[in-house]
Amino acid sequence: MTDTTTRDDSADAAAVATPELEAVNERQKRRRGLWLALPAWVYLAVFFAIPLAIVFVYSFATRNRFGGTDLSGWNLDSYRALGGDLVRAVLVRSVVLAVITTVICLVISYPFAYFMATRSTRTRNLMLVMVMIPFWTNFLVRNYAWYVILGTDGPLSTITETVGLGETRFLFTQTAVVLGLVYGFLPFMILPLYASIERIDGRLLEASRDLYATGAQSFRRVLLPLSMPGIVAGSILVFIPSLGAYVTPVILGGAKTTLLGGYIVTQFLEARNWPFGAALSSVLMIIMLGATVVYFRKGGQTL
Amino acid sequence: MGGPSVTAAVELSGVTKRFGDVVAVDNIDLAIADGEFFAMLGPSGCGKTTTLRMIAGLEFPTEGSLQIFGDEMGTLPPNRRPVNTVFQNYALFPHMSVRENVSFGLRMQGMSKSETASRTSTLIELVQLGGMEKRKPDQLSGGQQQRVALARALVNEPKVLLLDEPLGALDLKLRQEMQDELKTLQRELGVSFVFVTHDQEEALTMSDRIAVMHEGRLLQVGSAEEIYERPSNRFVADFIGQTNLIDGTVADRDTIVLANGSKVAATTGHVAGTSVAMSLRPEAMHIGRPEDIPATHATSSLTGTVTEVNYLGVALVYRIAVDWIELEVRAPTVSEVDRLKPGETASVWWARETAQVVAD
Amino acid sequence: MAGENITEPRGATKWLLRANASFVYIFFYIPILVLIVFSFSDNRNVGVWGGFTLDWYRDFAESDNTREALWNSVQIGLVATVISVVLGTASALALERFKFRGRAVFDALLYLPIIIPDVTMAVMMLLFFSEAAELFGFSKGFATITLSHIAFSISFVSVVVRARLGGMNDRLEEAAMDLYATRWQAFRYVTLPLIMPGILGGGLLALTLSLDDVVITQFVTGPGWTTLPVYVFGLIRKGVTPLINAVSVVMLVASTILVVLSLIAQRIRGGDTV
Ligand SMILES: Nc1ncnc2c1ncn2[C@@H]1O[C@H](COP(=O)(O)OP(=O)(O)OP(=O)(O)O)[C@@H](O)[C@H]1O
Ligand SMILES: [Mg+2]
């Protein structure tokens, strides 16, 4: 689409076709594709691939006494530091909370997606839009809303006090963080699950019932396996950002509940230990790549 | 046929199209006359669509010359060729109304607004879509979509119209109606139609000439009669209509030795020793008891055992086992007492000229 | 797979499914409602009701800081969106319609920004711009933020547009060319209108992501430069005033308007016809 037809309409127009001409044509077509891709290609190479490489390089560098980074004396110190007690605690806590978040999202979303997929087209579209609206709402705003609800004198506490349950103190706990993460990432689970369940031919379930399966058996033997790509995609889409979450733990978890994302940020903005921060980021990235490879192995196509 | 026009509407000489290792079209020579209704027939994957796409300019030949009214097309892009296409499944623009679809070609050619409007209206009337101008394609039935596709191509007054299985998506009744309409339209406009189809009956009834393709090669080009009655090779004989193919070897100009050693008379047209097949149409054979064979047909007959008789109303279909093969014979219905029964000995014979000898 | 039949759950299962769906929607919308309600509360304590007031909205309108941050966000969001829509659409066309050298690598590279956590992306951009600033000497701010936002938005636009292109019949472009359209005209009058819903959707996603971003912006911004989310985030960390409720509601309304507009645009464009 980049060049106009005036160019290829020219001299060769009336020539008899030959393999050479065909090859020229083929090359022209490839070149057209390359030209189209080129701007984005170059952009991503410069502003994504190179930065990615720099992070890996930095993770082997040394922090100097002034908080700067010496790009010499390459070593594995930053990776060794990953074994420290504090780091281990942060890593374990992050993974545990991310797993809990993923499981909760899955448990809520699966029946929801199934319910949605079995409605009439009209209802289904309406339900979908109603899921999309919070999804498009500003992420920070959505976290902040829970901050307001869970606050010491906030509406939740007021309600529990009024009914005689005493005041609740959820804010700045791990529970609040999980709540915020579930709230933030639930659509990421619902949408791929819905997409994969919606695609399943309803007659397959009928067939399984016809072949003497109970409702539960037909769920376990037919629906569940067939919706596996959606389950894997949704889980990865929730797990990865939960693991790297920064905004939610800071707003809802407070200082006590540092997670991996916040810990990395601290290395750069406060502790000024860039090589260590880079090593942590590299680890996060490798976990992410591993998860994605699993996804594609499981037969997922697109995210 | 197209009459004695000097230059062909479309002429392919030595055209080959390869996709990597696949030879989709293999060294085709073909001339389509001006004003001709030309059908291309062949099994799936034989290269019909590819040939059509090369004429349209949607695909360029790997090798060979492709001329339209004497002008070499070579690698000219589709927008600069005087041909238009009715696509399989129509490829109507879903975001445009009927009117916008039909006028698209004229607008792209930069024709004046008034001229575009009047020609568009004429064509919409011609295909009987008046009153539906504002509808989108998805608000039309299959047959109506078909007409839009036709109008959209014909409004440009192409010199050749290419149609890729235009009736494939329609149900039987509509299909027959559209066959008549297409044929009438083609006669009125006098434009060459190149028509790709899977359906041999469609090809046989509609076309002036038919090309039979197989595995990228052009096996035979001729009128419906020629192709049906004088197939040029085994594939064509087998592909067009029902036939019995009996293997044998040419002995001399008038004799074939069948696989069981019996000799039959036929115009062989091949040198001695060639292995051939004799094609006998089920309806071209007579059936009776061995003593019924006329003396004149002694060397154009076979004898075997009836295995099956099926009653089809106007006809009876017999299956007769002759040594190594089974023949299908279609004969007029006779009263039940006169019929041959399974297990009885039966003979078939045929007029010499109806037996076609074909090589592979 | 819609329909009422044997496979339709009955009894307890049916009610559990319904209850779960209701719960999901309550869960989604209660916090948003609470936020809106308390943005009108006349009490310095964010979660406590103290009578109706519009003071916080007035404060928002009169505060230079928020206005400037908002303006910065809008500028960055628009520029980043326009550029990533162009680059993302072009790359989607290239990947969906052409073979070219390096296609597989490009395809993989395009997926990475989608799956990489934003903290990692922030670290990447910080280190990159620090190195680049040393080499070329420029100051961080508008440019570095916008460049970073484009770097992740291209991929999202590309994925959304590709999905749309993949669902489009290839024959349509050929039909246009057969009807005397040049390659450009075929794109302009057939392909572009048909993928427009995808382009709009991708653009909306890019804009939303840009306006959502806190951590990357925080990492690559320079002195004196802040966007609305970063500013609000700072306020929340420092200790909250109900002003933030008002700011949040404004952001909420803005995103809702965007979504509604895009839905309307898709309807008008006849988005379901391909
Ligand atoms: N773009 C392409 N790339 C590779 N191979 C192709 C391409 N187009 C066609 N072919 C191959 O060329 C051969 C001929 O294809 P073509 O579409 O012309 O067949 P056809 O006769 O139209 O079949 P059908 O009746 O099924 O439509 C097939 O083997 C097909 O697989
Ligand atoms: Mg075909």
Image (cartoon, coloured by chain):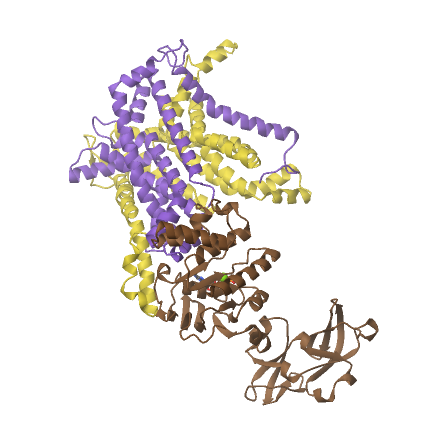
Q: Is residue B154 above or below residue A189?
A: below
Quarter holding residue B72: bottom left
Horizontal side of residue B175 vs B62, given as left or right: right
Q: How many marks?
A: 0
Q: Residue at x 35, y 15 (%)?
A: C242
Asked whether the viewer can see residue B122, the reply is yes
Question: How far across and how far down the image is residue A247, in percent?
Answer: 35, 27
Q: Is residue B174 above or below residue B224?
A: above
Q: Residue at x 48, y 52 (%)?
A: B124
Task: Pick whichever, C114 or C171, lies toward us.
Answer: C171
Say which colour chain B has.
brown
Outermost residue, right side? B337
Horizontal side of residue B265 vs A233, given as left or right: right
Question: How far across and how far down the image is residue B273, in percent?
Answer: 57, 87
Horizontal side of residue C73 vs B171, given as left or right: left
Asked whether the viewer can see residue A96, the reply is no
Q: Is residue B279 above or below residue A293?
A: below
Q: Residue at x 44, y 21 (%)?
A: C31
Q: The chain shown in purple is which? A: C
Quadrant assignment for the N terminus of chain C: top right
Question: How far across and how far down the image is residue C175, in percent?
Answer: 42, 55
Outermost residue, bottom side? B252
Q: The chain shown in yellow is which? A: A
Quarter holding residue A180: top left
Question: How far across and how far down the image is residue A106, in percent?
Answer: 50, 33
